[in-house]
Amino acid sequence: MKNLSVVTQFVLLGIPHTEGLETMLFVLFLSFYIFTLVGNLLILLVIVSSTQLHTPMYFFLCQLSVCDIFFPSVSSPKMLFYLSGNSRAISYAGCVSQLFFYHFLGGTECFLYTVMAYDRFVAICYPLRYSIIMRHRVCALLAMGTSVFGCIHSTFLTTLTFQLPYCGPNMVDYYFCDIPVVMNLACADTSALEMVGFINVGLVPLICFFFILTSYSFIVHSILQIRSTEGRHRAFSTCSAHLTAILIFYMPVIFIYLRPTPSPWLDATVQVLNNLVTPMLNPLIYSLRNKEVKSSLWTALRPLCFLSEQL
């Protein structure tokens, strides 16, 4: 990546119109961040320690938890650092890293939700062939593919953004380095590149969402063919958590990147929800709506509860 910039660092101005609220935001965002890390680490612990959860669905959920640990870690530590009264400056390389890893992990999650929808499609539409279709090698290739395509997607966007010359203003009117706010600081015409980036950022989630909708249209059709009410309820319950997580993930993405008239304050607020709240909610969604996860979680935590009672 060729660096034509004379700018050596950027300054993150934070969330617009929140001056004087730094202490309150620090406590709030730190709480979200801690709950996110603890919740996703618990999901990882439960899945790894419980043999009954060693299935393709929970394998992909495990990968999602890993992404949800690192995704908020791209922007949150720096944000918490300057909210606590420290410097808002971020190096040029740090800004590049933030943008790359943000879209790498976001893209990986986008592809991962699509793979998880395919997994539910096979489980419900072809239950007798599920173990053959979703064998270990296929699951490993699908999981690897989500990261590879996420990396390609992010590399394209990062190269597109930082091939521009940055030779003057370095005040980023946001709380982390993202494509629109960084491109605004370039010393060149960015209209063509903004259009390409807009198409890429918007097209990838829309294509994934189309495949997810296609999968679930077949799933709903198959579920409606089940005669017993209990059978239909059981089939729907296996998909409800995934559908809830998909809606929570895609709504902020569509709102931020596909709106014709951006609003910095509104976009930043929605972006915070996407970066911190969504990864925090995923463990709750998948544990509270899933009897197997709740049972395994209780089994994993029971020795700790017993130990605390003894003390």
Image: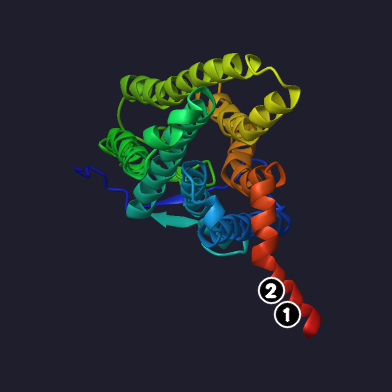
Q: Would you say residue 110 is visible in this rendering?
A: yes
Q: Residue furthest left?
A: 2
Residue 296 or residue 249, whichever sits in front: 296
* 109 sits to left or right of 250: left
In the rendered image, the quadrant that contains the C terminus is: bottom right
In the rendered image, the vertical position of residue 196 relative to residue 309, given as above or below = above
Amino acid marked by disc 1:
Leu
In the rendered image, the quadrant that contains the N terminus is: top left
SS at mark 1 in the image = helix
**How far, Cα to Cα, is label 1 from label 2?**
6 Å
Name the residue tied to disc 1: 307
Q: Residue furthest right?
A: 309
Determine the residue positioned at 69% across, 73% down: 303
Name the residue tied to disc 2: 303
Q: How many numbered dots are placed on residues in this image?
A: 2
* 52 sits to left or right of 205: right
Q: Would you say residue 26 is visible in this rendering?
A: no
SS at mark 2 in the image = helix
* 154 sits to left or right of 22: left
Q: Are marks 1 and 2 in contact (CB under 8 Å)?
A: yes
In the rendered image, the vertical position of residue 24 relative to residue 215, given as above or below = below
